[in-house]
Image (tube, rainbow, N blue to C red):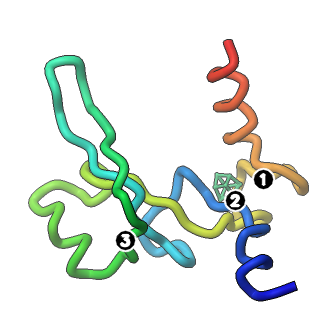
Amino acid sequence: MSSNQQQVRVPFCPSAQPGMANCQVLGVLTECEEGPRLSYLNERLAVTDEVLAMAAPAKPTKVFRFAATCEESKCTHFDGHDCQLAERSFKLCRR
Ligand code: SF4
């Protein structure tokens, strides 16, 4: 198995925070009349201090949506096998 195939198997956290391993910007939030709208980037963008500074004066988490390597047992949403946050989100999407 190549290293690329191994990377695909590692769960990516859709609720990541800057500072998590392999953190990348997935999208940018903008305010619309209907509320916040998320526009996904066409390419993944690595999180750097320069990227985070672009959110100023807002907090980066108010402007960007991040993804990162799942922290598994370090995270309260991990049940030992799966991410329960993702499970709950998936169930809500199927309603
Ligand atoms: S278990 Fe935690 S770190 Fe992993 S994907 Fe879920 S919320 Fe993110």
Q: Earlier in the sequence, mark 2 or mark 3?
A: 3
Instruction: Categorize mark 3 by other alpha carbons within 10 Å: few (<14), some (14-19), many (20+).
Output: some
Residue extending farthest top: 95
Residue that appears at 64% across and 31% down? 89
Q: Quadrant of ligand 1?
A: bottom right
Q: Earlier in the sequence, mark 1 or mark 3?
A: 3
Q: Does mark 2 have its CB less than 8 Å from ligand 1?
A: yes
Residue holding disc 3:
45
Which quadrant is the N terminus positioned in?
A: bottom right
Per the model, the C-alpha gap separating discs 1 and 3 is 26 Å
* Contact between labelled residues 3 and 2, with CB atoms less than 8 Å apart: no
- Between 93 and 42, the one nearer to me in the picture: 42
The kind of secondary structure element at disc 1 is loop
The kind of secondary structure element at disc 3 is strand
Residue 86: name its quadrant: top right
The amino acid on which the numbered mark 2 sits, given as a three-letter code, is Cys
Give the left or right position of residue 77, taking residue 48 as reference: right
* Contact between labelled residues 1 and 2, with CB atoms less than 8 Å apart: yes
Residue holding disc 1:
78
Is residue 13 shown above or below 71? above
Mark 1 or mark 3, which is nearer to you?
Answer: 3
Which quadrant is the C terminus positioned in?
A: top right
Residue holding disc 2:
75
Mark 2 or mark 3, which is nearer to you?
Answer: 3
Residue that appears at 53% across and 72% down? 20
The amino acid on which the numbered mark 3 sits, given as a three-letter code, is Leu
